[in-house]
Image (tube, rainbow, N blue to C red):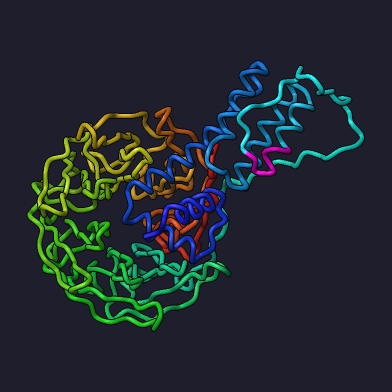
Amino acid sequence: MLDHERFLELAAASIDFELETSEAAELDRHLAGCGSCRRTLQAMRDDARTIMSLPVRAMPIDRSQDALAGALTMRRPSATLRLVLVAAVLALVAVGGLAVGAQIVRNFLDNRVVTTLPSPTAPGLVEPSPNPTNGPTAPAVTEAPFGWASGGDLVFARSDHAAALLDDGRVLASGGHDASLVATRSTELRDPVTGLWSKGPDMATARELHAEVTLPDGSVMVIGGVGSNGRALASTEVYDPVANSWSAGAPMTHARSAFVAVRLPNGIIAVIGGYDSAGAPLASAERYDWSHQQWSDYHLMTDARAKFSGTLLDNGDVLVAGGFGKAGKSIATAELLDPGALRWTPAGTMGVARRLQTATLLADGRVLVAGGFGASGSLPIASAEIYDPATNGWNGVAAMATARDVAGAAALPDGRAIVLGGSSAGTRIASTELFDPIQLRWSMGPPLAVARSYFALVVLGDRRVLVVGGEDDRGNPLSSTEILAAPSGR
């Protein structure tokens, strides 16, 4: 675990996208086991949002100074936040005069904490000419573009695959199916420095609709899925990133595909639900103890389910919601796994039955669920709702602009959630939508360059979002990848 000073140093750098690859991995490992630190990091990001929204242009001079004084006494800001505050100061200059703004800028860029700002009428202050010919020029405020760029082309086009972030910053993509619609054994790795993908060693078993989880020792386990014979697998394999090789892992108790796998804060891997070899939804769940390389069963869920969402909550519980149930249609029930007690408890019922939806853990610990297939199972839905752990209940929120299923979603550094791509009435879509958890509303986000569904999504160590492969409108697997430079604040 990191000490407090080191954590704050890395947290500030992450807000500014200035983490080295090794530092990002160091921070990710720490956050995985420290819920309070995750909340602290989010509070720092909220500070950025507060600074970005300072209404200095609309304020009288005294209120503008009070607002800036409050911002300046926050934690020591990163470079991005310094530039943001300079923008706010320049707005203040337009209201209160250059003398005031120049003094604030000098103090702030020197990293001196300012608690009392000079008054424009204070003795000894003489306001310069509005068009000075001498003196320092205020720095230009620039912001990284909020949009998608190429993440490099895969060696092999693939869909229904899995991908995970390694401790050294590389991304491992495994399995899926190729243009022949047959499961593949191939793997590949993305270099975080060059952004290029290169072929990795083949797995022993071809698989798709599987899971890929990074273990506490830095190795990666691929779990279950559907084999080349079309049947669910119980086998697992472990990738050693140092040796660049695969070895057989301990098999699960139950063969399964289209399930959820979650790494818990203590390193245990929880594997939940999915389809069995006969294509029936499973109520079973099991846990992998990586230190002893053993699987053991949890208690059964109340409802068998596949193609559902699973989310690790801040308290270490796992929320599962919706999915394809035994009756052959989408279900609305939700359950909580208490990993310590090895048992399930009810987590309310969603307002809308759904499967193949997205689920995103918000900064305040709530979970946003959006889209998917509804009860009819024939058309995607646009509705969204939020699970609140404090009440163990669900509340509906505004619907997305576009109904979608098999989409992707991620939490952004500024606290918003992005839902991207997917399928709408059989057509692959490139649009993205942003959810504001404070205002509880959606807005359009930057569109993907390529419409896609059935892709893999990885959040990198610097919080950028990487979208890998997927399927186009004709059902062909894609080799393209895209990366989102997410905003650190608004």
Asked if one can make out residue 474 in the rendered structure from this viewpoint, the answer is: no
Furthest-front residue in this view: 123
On the rendered structure, is 185 left or right of 307? right
On the rendered structure, is 449 left or right of 317? right
Toward the viewer: 184 or 202? 202
Total numbered circles: 0
Instruction: Identify the image quadrant of residue 396.
Output: top left
- What residue sits 21% from the left and 44% below the top? 322
Residue 307, image x, y percentages = 24, 52
| Quadrant location of the N terminus in the rendered image | bottom left
* Residue 487 magenta: no
Residue 214, image x, y percentages = 33, 66
Instruction: Identify the image quadrant of residue 394.
Output: top left
Furthest-right residue in this view: 133
- What residue sits 54% from the left and 65% below the top? 152
Query: Against 163, is 14 above or below?
Result: above
Toward the viewer: 489 or 454? 489
- What residue sits 19% from the left and 66% below the top? 288
Instruction: Identify the image quadrant of residue 385.
Output: top left
Region rendered in magenta: 106-112
- What residue sits 12% from the left and 56% below the top? 282
Residue 196, image x, y percentages = 54, 70
Toward the viewer: 339 or 275? 339
| Quadrant location of the C terminus in the rendered image | top right
Residue 448, image x, y percentages = 51, 50
Asked if one can make out residue 45 in the rendered structure from this viewpoint, the answer is: yes
* Residue 111 magenta: yes
